[in-house]
Amino acid sequence: LLQPNVTLKGQYLESARREVRLTADDPDALKNIRNAGAANLTMSLPISRLGGLGGRRKAGAKREGGFSPLQPIRSVFGKMQDIQTTFSFDRGATLSRVVGDAGSAFKTGFSEVTSADLERISGSNATANRRYSTRASTAFRPSNAMTIDIRGDHSLSFADLSFGQRRTEKIQWPDVQGRWVDLHRLLRLDQALTSLTVRSSYSHIMDEDGPVDAAVERTIETDTFGPILGWDFVFRNGVRASLASSLTRASTIDARVYGVTRDKQTTNSDLRITKTFPAAKGIRFPFTRKTVRLPNDLNLNFTCNVMGDRQVVSRSGERQYTESDTKGLKVGSGTTYNFSRAITGGFNFEYRQNDDRKLGIKRRGITIDFNAAFSF
């Protein structure tokens, strides 16, 4: 029913290069060793079968009228895909400047325990790490044109270092992505467009880091709307356009610096337009009625990007201040043309501007690029 799939992979490596021996007294058999192990379990939870819950009737049974309490459950789960889950565990350990046999347990890759025959020489260092990860994903389709992807991730990792054990936990939930295709039919834009797609997504990530036996030292919470709304147009005249705007907000709390919070906001708006002039149809310029025919296809593109980045620092009992505040603009265009099967050329132009509002400094630049590629 769940169709579980388990994979195991272990690795053991040792290095006895001359660089390992630092002094003349070091034994010739001195080496560095390390291992790694990974275990993965994937399975599918068939929640789509709940769409048929209570839907079957026994032979000869009459169909009763009225509302069934199971109807909303069948309606929702009938439009969902099975939940795909992944559980994984991976670990690793390293030992430097050792002599002897590491032991069968260490060589499997799934243990950091070494045999009694292994001897650690002066200056030897040992590190170990392990991580537990869980991922689940599904999709909900309210209609044939609309799809909502839902995903959740969780990871917990430990690192045993020379200065102590560290713990890192990361939770990504919710993580939702939505798409609505063939929207031009609903808006009755069939005469101008062959395709219109709207997309949007949102994710929330919480990241914590600190020692294993103490309180959390650093917490980062990130909300990403990427994009808030994204539009993909395909016009009947061959023009393709993509317009998207995204927003990311991150809040960092560092317990090592009492009462300090850093809030960062990043915005990004992007416009891309491409047009391909087929060689068979040619090009008709606005200032002439004649059609210019070329031996090969001509590709044109235009891009415009507006970005912003602002970080504010807040301290308990003090006024907040702006640590950084920048705005950016990039406008570019490009042309590519295949002169022949062996020669390809292009022209690119880009204008960029960066405005540092905190320092009051503006930087501008222009790039003009001619390129050619020859195949022989």
Image (cartoon, rainbow, N blue to C red):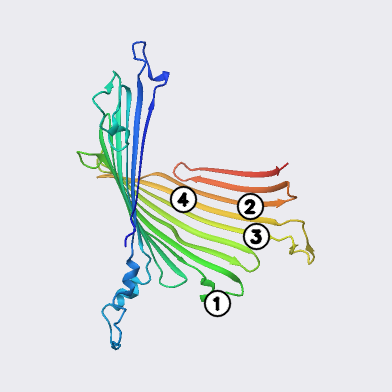
CB within 8 Å, label 3 to label 2: no
Q: Which residue is mark 1?
A: 188
Relative to 103, is 313 above or below? Answer: below
Using the image as rendered, state which of residue 313 and residue 178 is in the foreground: 178
The residues bearing labels 1 and 3 have C-alpha atoms spaced at a distance of: 23 Å
Q: Most extreme residue toward the top, as rendered?
A: 24
Question: What label sits on residue 275 in the rendered view?
Answer: 3
Q: Quadrant of residue 278?
A: bottom right
Q: Quadrant of residue 95?
A: top left
Q: If the image is split into quadrants, where does the C terminus sit? A: top right
Residue 53: x, y in percent?
A: 30, 74
Q: Looking at the image, is mark 4 or mark 3 earlier in the sequence?
A: 3
Residue 260: x, y in percent?
A: 28, 43
Is residue 319 shown to the viewer in this render?
no
The residue type indicated by label 3 comes to Lys
Query: Which of labels 4 and 1 is toward the front?
Result: 1
Q: Which residue is mark 4?
A: 308
Q: At numbered mark 4, what does the secondary structure look like: helix, strand or loop? A: strand
Density class for disc 4 (Cα within 10 Å; few <14, some 14-19, many ≥20) is some
The residue type indicated by label 2 comes to Ser
Count every numbered label the image shows and give the total. 4
Q: Which residue is mark 2?
A: 333
Density class for disc 2 (Cα within 10 Å; few <14, some 14-19, many ≥20) is some
180 left or right, relative to 23: right
Query: Which of labels 3 and 2 is toward the front?
Result: 3
Q: Looking at the image, is mark 2 or mark 4 earlier in the sequence?
A: 4
Q: If the image is split into quadrants, where does the N terminus sit? A: bottom left
Q: Most extreme residue toward the left, as rendered?
A: 213
Query: Which of labels 1 and 2 is toward the front?
Result: 1
